[in-house]
Image (cartoon, rainbow, N blue to C red):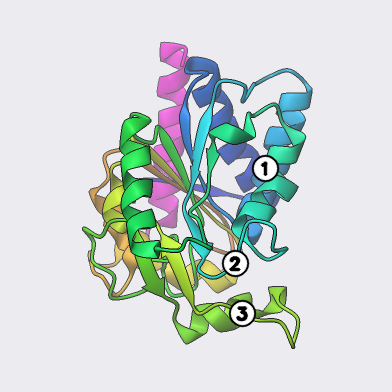
C-alpha cells in the first residue's frame, strides 16, 4: 500500500487525475472503475480539463461504477448514473454505451448483480479502480461487517451512511436504504486501486485502513492485501496516521527512483 500525503484537497485531485491520465495514455482502451461522492468530483473536473486540452481521451475506454441506489432509475436526479453524466460523462469524449452503472431499477436485482460481475469479467477486468471512503471505512457501499471476499450484491446501508447522504435528498423525497454495490472481492481484483480522502472527518477511517488490523469492521482495510493500492490524502485526512513522516519520506525516495528510471 502506497500512502501519498499532500497539502490540500486540490492537490489530492490533481495527483489522482495524473494517475488516470497516465493510465489512459498507456492503454487508451482501459477499463475504468469509477466512484461517486463529493471527493471524486474534483478529480473529474481535472480529467475534464485534461480531455478538453487533448491530453487524454476516453474514446476507447470502458467504465464500471462501484454502486447505485436500489430503487432509483438512471433519470432520477439522485441516482449515481445521473451523477456520473453530470460530473463526467457529459463533458468528455467517452461513448456512453461503454459506461456501466449498476441498474438500480432492475426487476431482478440479484440477477443484475450476477450480470454485472460477468460484464466486468467479459471486459477483461478493471484496470484502475477509483475509490472514496466513508467515515466508517466503507468502500463502495460495502459497510462494516461486509465479507472481504464479497462480490457485487444488494447491500443494506447503515444509518450513518444514510444520514451522511441525506443532505442530497429533499426532506419529502424518497431516500433508498438499499444499494447494489461491487463487493470487496470484486474491488480487490482490480489491477490498480486509487483511494482519495480529504478532510479531518476521514482521518479515523484512513488510520484504520492504513495502520489498523485487517478487519471487516473497516472494509477499506482489505486494501492492505492489494498489490497496487495507492491511498492519496490531504493533511486533514492524514492527521491520525502514526507514521506520517515515514510515508512522506517513502514518496520522496520513490520520486527520485521514478526520475532516475524516466517513469
Compute the Cα span from label 2 to label 1.
23 Å
Q: Which residue is mark 2?
A: 72
Tell which of 73 and 139 is nearer to you: 73
Magenta region's main secondary structure?
A: helix
Q: Which residue is mark 3?
A: 175
- In the rendered structure, find residue 230 and report the number of the disc placed on it: none
* Residue 250 inside the magenta-drawn segment: yes
Span of residues in magenta: 238-263
Judging from the image, what secondary structure is the residue with disc 3 in? Answer: loop
Compute the Cα span from label 3 to label 2.
9 Å
Classify 119 as above or below 137: above
Which mark is first along the chain, 1 or 2? 1
Depth-wise, is mark 3 or mark 1 nearer the camera?
3
Compute the Cα span from label 3 to label 1.
25 Å
Where residue 129 sits, quadrant-wise, is top left
Q: Position of residue 20 (x, y in %)?
A: 55, 32
Which residue is painted at 65% across and 60% down in the image? 38
Q: Position of residue 11 (x, y in %)?
A: 66, 44
Depth-wise, is mark 3 or mark 2 nearer the camera?
2
Is residue 12 shown left or right of residue 127? right
Structural crowding at the residue carrying mark 2, measured as other residues with C-alpha within 10 Å and reported as few (<14), some (14–19) or many (≥20): many
Judging from the image, what secondary structure is the residue with disc 1 in? Answer: helix
Is residue 181 shown left or right of residue 5? left
Depth-wise, is mark 2 or mark 1 nearer the camera?
2
Classify 176 as above or below 209: below
* Residue 200 inside the magenta-drawn segment: no
Which mark is first along the chain, 1 or 3? 1
Q: Which residue is mark 1?
A: 44
Which mark is first along the chain, 2 or 3? 2
Q: Position of residue 160 (x, y in %)?
A: 50, 83
Amino acid at each position: 500500500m502506497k500512502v501519498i500525503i499532500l497539502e490540500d484537497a486540490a492537490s489530492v485531485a490533481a495527483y489522482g487525475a495524473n494517475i488516470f491520465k497516465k493510465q489512459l495514455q498507456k492503454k487508451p482502451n482501459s477499463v475504468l472503475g469509477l466512484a461517486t461522492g463529493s471527493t471524486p468530483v474534483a478529480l473529474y473536473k481535472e480529467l475534464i480539463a485534461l480531455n478538453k486540452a487533448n491530453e487524454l481521451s476516453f474514446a476507447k475506454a470502458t467504465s464500471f461504477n462501484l454502486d447505485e441506489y436500489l430503487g432509483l432509475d438512471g433519470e432520477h436526479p439522485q441516482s449515481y448514473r445521473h451523477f456520473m453524466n453530470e460530473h463526467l460523462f457529459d463533458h468528455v469524449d467517452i461513448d456512453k454505451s461503454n459506461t456501466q452503472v449498476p441498474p438500480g431499477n432492475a426487476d431482478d436485482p440479484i440477477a443484475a448483480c450476477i450480470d454485472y460481475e460477468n460484464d466486468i469479467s467479459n471486459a477483461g477486468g478493471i484496470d484502475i479502480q477509483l475509490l472514496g471512503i466513508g467515515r466508517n471505512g466503507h468502500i463502495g457501499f460495502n459497510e462494516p461487517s461486509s465479507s472481504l471476499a464479497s462480490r457485487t450484491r444488494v447491500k443494506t446501508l447503515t444509518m450513518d451512511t444514510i444520514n451522511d447522504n441525506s443532505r442530497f435528498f429533499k426532506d419529502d423525497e424518497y431516500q433508498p436504504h438499499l444499494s447494489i454495490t461491487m463487493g470487496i472481492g470484486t474491488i480487490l481484483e482490480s489491477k490498480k486501486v486509487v483511494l482519495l480522502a480529504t478532510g479531518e472527518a476521514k482521518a479515523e477511517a484512513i488510520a484504520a485502513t492504513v495502520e489498523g488490523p485487517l478487519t471487516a469492521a473497516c472494509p477499506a482495510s482489505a486494501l492492505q492485501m492489494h498489490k497496487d493500492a495507492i491511498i492519496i490524502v490531504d493533511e486533514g485526512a492524514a492527521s491520525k496516521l502514526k507514521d506520517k513522516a515515514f510515508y512522506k519520506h517513502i514518496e520522496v525516495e520513490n520520486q527520485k527512483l521514478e526520475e532516475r528510471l524516466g517513469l
